Image: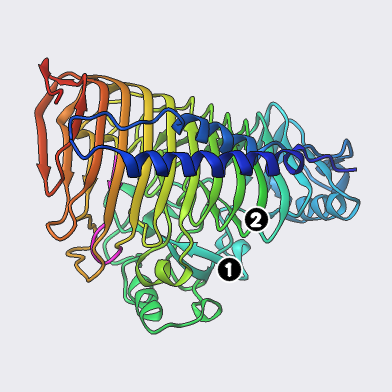
Amino acid sequence: MLNFKRNRLRNNALVLLNCLLLLSISCKNNEKKAETSEPPQTSVWSEADAIIEKIGTIEFPDSTFDIKDYGAVADGRTLNTEAFSKAIEACSLTGGGKVVVSSGKYLTGPIHLKSNVNLHLEKGAEILFTKDKSAYLPAVHTSYEGMEIMNYSPLIYAKGQKNIAVTGSGILNGQADKTNWWPWCGADRYGYQEGDPKQKDEHNLPTLFKMIEDGTPVEKRVFGEGNQLRPLFLQTLECENVLIQGVTFTNAPFWVIHPLKSKYVTVDGITVNSHGPNNDGCDPEYSSYVHITNCKFNTGDDCIAIKSGRNGDGRRVNIPSENIVVENCDMKDGHGGVVMGSEISAGVRNVFVRNCTMNSPNLDRAIRIKTNTLRGGFVENVYVKDIEVGQVKEAVLKINTYYGIYGVQEGEFIPSISNINLENITVEKGGKYGLLIKGREERPVSGITLKNVTIKGAETPLLVENCEPINYINTSINGVDYSN
């Protein structure tokens, strides 16, 4: 019988969290307007603890289902899609348990998880996802860069399920490379050849943009065969009680871990080592109560990127991502350590980051917020503390409301960015800028506080535009004290 500690903990935790949030709001309303005053934050990290408590833990029944008992062959050549499907089905139908992948190499198509199933990879197990693109059809309800579509199935996928997990110490190998999936991004360095189809071609992203503009229902936004929009690695859509623990992800086609419209998600002790295009490590989107802890990220894009939909599709769904805790993680290569955006049209709030290390000559920024006036959205109540940054290339904190990689992206949705707090941060080599902030004249960035922050080696200490005065408390950049 299932024993979910989460159900026992949530009610008390929710009461505590609501009280703490009310107290925090009350404190902010009574705060003196003087920029030199220190904002009271005595309860902030208790809010983070309450979020973790509400997420709780999942325990599965002791029943085990070895995929070899359902015909799986660990030779790296035999296609085991049916064996995985049968084992997961049997596990779910009998009330749940653990689907075991023992040592060996298992080739498979997409794996679709079901409620109460823990897919467990033992030491020495490696799942190889086939390069045969037809295996990922028929198209399923998924997403691409913050827009919902019908597309190739994610490599691991669950929709509308509860109490699901992927755990263990094995490897999940997407087998994406310069000959498989990656060339569709259209970049030469990822294997694209001039004249080959790519994601920016008219029948791909431009068609999807037009569908969203026209209000086309998701079920009629059909891509897949004949299109070049890459699948996600692991996606949970409209799921509750999700655990991703211990495993290693490599060679991803696109974003790696993507909780979408999901609640009570724990990502614990995983390793992402994948340097392909758009190989974000973990991207919670339209999701709440997410705990990312003890993880290692070495990626081709953002290590962690918190999202909430793109442009009109994000405003249609209108579910902010909120109540997210990141702690005890190690970030190496990536466009950013912890990022909010760029798909952020429904907003992000209540993000807590603590006890992390970020260090690589190929890490562009430590904390990053990115949006524009087509995407709009808001970011509020972000708390970052106890972070050790060895080296970043561009900036320790970058806030950009002019973000764009598809040319000029100007619209009528002025983003709002407020209450961003950095505390106990040490940076040995700050890159091109210490702080790089580009707000909008119509709505400047507000409520930025740096407390006990030391940044060394920044080429330019500050580049700040359209931002209300920053509150510096015991903060120095390149040996200069900026304290108010």
Please name the residue shown 47% across and 73% down the image. 226
- Residue lying at the far top in this picture: please name it: 479
**Viewer-proximal residue among 32 and 131:** 32
Label annotation for residue 162: none
Q: Which residue is mark 2?
A: 239
Q: SS for tag 1? A: strand
Give the magenta part as a residue range. 368-375
Q: SS for tag 2? A: loop
Is 165 inside the magenta-drawn segment?
no
Mark 1, Cα crowd under 10 Å, few <14 / some 14-19 / many 20+, is: some
**Viewer-proximal residue among 318 and 215:** 318
Is 370 inside the magenta-drawn segment?
yes
Q: Can residue 251 be seen?
A: no
Residue 82: image location, x then y, percent: 77, 56
Please name the residue shown 91% across and 51% down the image. 94
Q: Which residue is mark 1?
A: 141
Please name the residue shown 30% across and 63% down the image. 375
Who comes first in sequence, dot 1 or dot 2?
Answer: 1
